[in-house]
C-alpha cells in the first residue's frame, strides 16, 4: 500500500529546500526500495515489484515491460544480490524515461530564437487539468529568458476562463487578446497572431477550452485554430497536451480519447505534487509516443520544471526516499 501519512508529511514540507520531484518519489518508491532492503531475494520479489509499480500508477503494460527487462538482465548477468537488482531497475527506468534522443529533440523544438517569426503554442487538454495555469507558468519562463510573450484567450466557453487569463496577464504584465464569451476561438487566435506580428512578439501562447458550447467538434475547432496560424504565415503552431498526474491512468485514457487523431508536440504533466503517485510519468510515452517536457509541481507561477529524466530516476531511488 502507498503510505499516505508519509505522503502528507512530504507535502507539508513543501516549502523546504527539497527538490519538488523527490517529494513525488517519496511515496511509492520508498515502498519499492524497501523490497530490496533484504539480505537475499525471495521468489516473491517479482510479484511484489509488480504490485508496487501498479500501485504507484505505472500502468500494467509498462510495469510488465520493465519487469521483463529487469528479469532478463538479472538472469543474463547472474545477479543475486538485492542491491544489484535495484541498480538494474534504476537503469531500466532511466532508459524508459529518456527514449533515446527523443527528449533532446523535444527540448530544442520549444526553444525560441530571436528575430524570427513568433512561435505559437496551443495548450490543449480536458477540463481542469491545468492548461491555463501551465500557460501562465510557461509565459513566466519565456519572460525570464528575455522573450516577448502575448496570450490569446481562446477558451471562450466560460467568461470566467477569459477572466482567469486576464488576471494572469495582469500579474505577468502581458498583453492578453480576448473576445467575448461564446465567440469564435479561431478569431481570437487570428487577432492574437496579428497583434504578435505588429508588436514583434517572440511567443504566442493560446489558451483553449476542454469543451465547446455548441455542437461544434472540439477537435475540428482546434484544427481550425492551427490552420488560422498557418494562414497567418507563421507556420504550424505547436500543441502542448496538458495531463493531470493526480488522475493517474484514467487521466491518460481520458486525454487519449480527447486527443483522438490529433497529435501533439509536447506534454506537460501537472499536479505531481498533491496526491499524485508519480508513476504515471512512466506511462506517458507508451500512450502518446512522446516524453514529458515539463512537470507542474504546484499552483504558483514558479512551479514548473523542465523534466529531466536522468535526475528524475535518480530522485526516485535516492537514499533519502
Ligand atoms: N497542485 C497543483 N495544482 C495545479 C497545478 N497546475 C494547475 N493546478 C490547479 O488546477 C486547477 C485547474 O487549473 P486550470 O489551469 O484552471 O485548468 P484548465 O481547466 O485545464 O485550464 C487550478 O486550481 C490550478 O491552480 C499543479 O501543478 N499542481
Ligand atoms: Mg483553463
Image: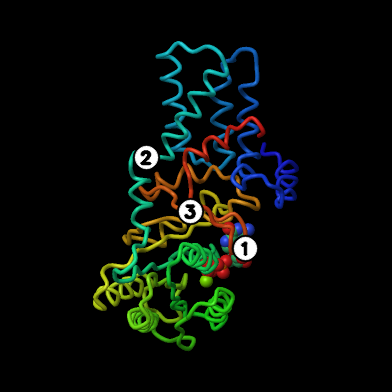
Residue 127 visible to an observer of this rendering: no
Residues under labels 2 and 1: Cα distance? 30 Å
Q: Position of residue 54 (x, y in %)?
A: 55, 37
> Which label's residue is closer to the chain start, 3 or 1?
3
The 10 Å Cα crowd at callout 1, few under 14, some 14 to 19, many 20 or more, is few
Residue 290 visible to an observer of this rendering: yes
**Where is mark 2, residue-wise?**
99
State ligand 1's quadrant.
bottom right
Q: Quadrant of the N terminus?
A: top right
Q: For residue 73, which numbered disc appears in the image? A: none
Q: Are marks 3 and 1 in contact (CB under 8 Å)?
A: no
Residues under labels 2 and 3: Cα distance? 16 Å
Q: Is residue 263 left or right of residue 23?
A: left
> Which label's residue is closer to the chain start, 2 or 3?
2
| Image height of 276 relative to 309, above or below | below
Residue found at x 50% / y 45%: 281
Q: Is residue 155 left or right of residue 112?
A: right
Dividing the picture into quadrants, the one containing residue 216 is: bottom left
**Where is mark 3, residue-wise?**
294
**Where is mark 1, residue-wise?**
300
Q: Residue furthest bottom?
A: 180
| Image height of 279 relative to 43, above or below | below
Q: Position of residue 102 (x, y in %)?
A: 34, 45
Residues under labels 3 and 1: Cα distance? 15 Å
Towards the viewer: 249 or 215:
249
Q: Are marks 2 and 3 in contact (CB under 8 Å)?
A: no
Assign a secondary structure to mark 2.
loop
Q: Quadrant of the C terminus?
A: top right
Q: Position of residue 154 (x, y in %)?
A: 43, 78
> Which label's residue is closer to the chain start, 2 or 1?
2
In this view, the mark in front (2 or 1) = 1
Assign a secondary structure to mark 1.
loop
Amino acid at each position: 500500500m502507498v503510505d499516505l501519512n508519509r505522503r502528507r508529511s512530504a507535502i507539508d514540507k513543501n516549502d523546504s529546500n527539497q527538490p519538488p520531484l523527490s517529494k513525488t518519489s517519496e511515496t511509492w518508491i520508498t515502498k519499492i526500495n524497501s523490497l530490496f532492503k533484504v539480505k537475499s531475494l525471495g521468489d516473491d520479489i517479482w510479484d511484489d515489484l509488480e504490485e508496487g509499480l501498479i500501485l504507484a500508477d505505472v500502468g500494467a503494460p509498462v510495469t510488465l515491460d520493465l519487469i521483463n527487462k529487469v528479469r532478463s538482465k538479472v538472469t543474463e548477468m547472474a545477479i543475486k544480490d538485492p542491491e544489484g537488482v535495484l541498480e538494474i531497475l534504476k537503469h531500466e527506468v532511466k532508459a524508459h524515461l529518456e527514449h533515446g534522443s527523443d527528449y533532446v529533440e523535444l527540448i530544442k523544438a520549444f526553444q525560441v530564437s530571436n528575430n524570427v517569426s513568433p512561435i505559437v503554442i496551443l495548450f490543449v487538454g480536458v477540463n481542469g487539468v491545468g492548461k491555463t495555469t501551465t500557460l501562465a507558468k510557461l509565459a513566466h519562463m519565456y519572460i525570464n529568458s528575455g522573450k516577448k510573450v502575448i496570450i490569446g484567450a481562446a477558451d471562450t466557453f466560460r467568461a470566467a476562463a477569459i477572466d482567469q487569463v486576464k488576471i494572469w496577464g495582469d500579474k505577468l504584465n502581458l498583453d492578453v487578446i480576448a473576445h467575448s464569451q461564446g465567440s469564435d476561438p479561431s478569431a481570437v487566435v487570428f487577432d492574437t497572431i496579428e497583434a504578435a506580428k505588429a508588436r514583434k512578439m517572440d511567443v504566442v501562447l493560446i489558451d483553449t477550452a476542454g469543451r465547446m458550447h455548441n455542437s461544434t467538434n472540439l477537435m475540428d475547432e482546434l484544427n481550425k485554430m492551427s490552420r488560422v496560424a498557418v494562414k497567418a504565415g507563421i507556420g504550424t503552431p505547436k500543441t502542448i497536451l496538458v495531463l493531470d498526474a493526480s488522475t493517474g491512468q484514467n487521466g491518460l485514457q481520458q486525454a487519449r480519447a480527447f486527443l483522438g487523431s490529433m497529435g501533439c508536440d509536447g506534454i506537460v504533466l501537472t499536479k505531481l505534487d498533491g496526491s499524485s503517485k508519480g508513476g504515471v510519468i512512466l506511462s506517458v510515452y507508451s500512450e502518446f509516443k512522446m516524453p514529458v517536457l515539463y512537470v507542474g509541481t504546484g499552483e504558483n507561477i514558479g512551479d514548473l520544471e523542465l523534466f529531466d529524466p536522468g535526475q528524475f530516476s535518480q530522485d526516485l531511488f535516492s537514499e533519502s526516499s
